[in-house]
């Protein structure tokens, strides 16, 4: 059992509501971790503001200011290393990371995706699920590998999709669950309760066997 809080670096591109949920869970003592740096490829991303408000070092690193993807990633890695980051959390980070970056933090990069993977990967998870007409969607926290949203799955949450949902109402229902499962995934990692075997994550946690959801309900 580790004694010092896990040092987490969060990469964002936008509003950073997931970053906020992670900061809040750490500060509330629910997760034995600490967000030690926030980095965005978008200079004015509100996520950076959220970090600063919480007293966390925040860095705008616009990717188009670099001659190559490698140079951009070198800067990200330099910031993460400067803060001794142990776990990298992608939270609405809209840049693909190269194998070089991934190998620098092998097995220590997580991402959150707003759909039940492996369904609806890519940048429009909520839109695609809504357009398909699914009865359930949700969100997934997974370890990052070289594919797009293909890495080993840590935790998922399921939400119903209703006939009168819009893409936005479904996205909002999903986002509320994102804010619950990302901190939980970090907690499980920080407590050493995750083990990756191939593409399967073995989770040492209580389980709930008697669960089934039906939409519409059975009666
Ligand atoms: C979330 O829906 C996340 O799943 C997706 O991008 C969105 C980011 O939202 N990858 P926020 O910036 O955390 O508010």
Image (spheres, rainbow, N blue to C red):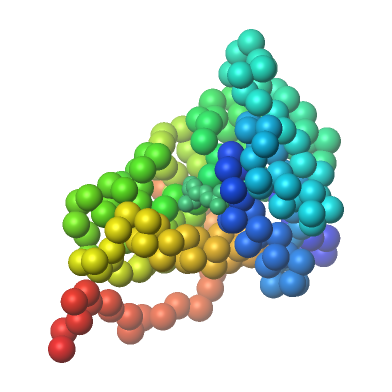
The quadrant of the rendering that contains the N terminus is bottom right
Q: Position of residue 40 (x, y in %)?
A: 66, 36
145 horizontally vs 119: left or right = right
Q: What residue do we see at 70% from left, 23% from top?
A: 74
Q: What residue do we see at 36% from left, 67% from top?
A: 158
Q: What residue do we see at 33% from left, 84% from top?
A: 210
Q: Which quarter of the picture shows residue 133?
A: bottom left
Residue 159 against residue 154 in the figure, above or below: below
94 horizontally vs 215: left or right = right
Q: Residue furthest top?
A: 67
Q: Residue furthest left?
A: 219
Residue 114 visible? The answer is yes
Q: Position of residue 38 (x, y in %)?
A: 72, 44
Q: What residue do we see at 30% from left, 69% from top?
A: 160
Q: Position of residue 77 (x, y in %)?
A: 71, 30
Residue 203 visible? The answer is no
Judging depth in this view, the residue of 201 and 132 nearest the camera is 132
Q: Position of residue 118 (x, y in %)?
A: 32, 49
């Amino acid at each position: 059992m580790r004694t010092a809080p896990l040092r987490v670096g969060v990469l964002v591109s936008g509003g950073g509501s997931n970053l906020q949920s992670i900061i809040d869970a750490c500060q509330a003592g629910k997760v034995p971790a600490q967000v030690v740096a926030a980095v965005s490829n978008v200079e004015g991303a509100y996520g950076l503001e959220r970090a600063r408000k919480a007293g966390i070092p925040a860095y705008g690193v616009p990717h188009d200011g670099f001659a190559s993807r490698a140079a951009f990633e070198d800067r990200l890695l330099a910031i993460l290393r400067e803060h001794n980051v142990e776990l990298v959390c992608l939270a609405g980070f809209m840049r693909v990371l190269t194998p070089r970056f991934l190998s620098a933090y092998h097995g220590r990069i997580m991402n959150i995706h707003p759909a039940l993977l492996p369904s609806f990967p890519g940048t429009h998870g909520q839109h695609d699920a809504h357009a398909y007409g699914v009865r359930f969607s949700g969100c997934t926290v997974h370890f990052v590998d070289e594919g797009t949203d293909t890495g080993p799955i840590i935790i998922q949450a399921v939400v119903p999709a209703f006939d009168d949902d819009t893409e936005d109402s479904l996205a909002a229902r999903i986002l509320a669950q994102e804010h619950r499962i990302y901190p939980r995934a970090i907690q499980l990692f920080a407590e050493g309760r995750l083990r990756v075997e191939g593409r399967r994550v073995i989770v040492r946690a209580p389980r709930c066997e008697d669960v089934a959801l039906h939409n519409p309900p059975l009666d």
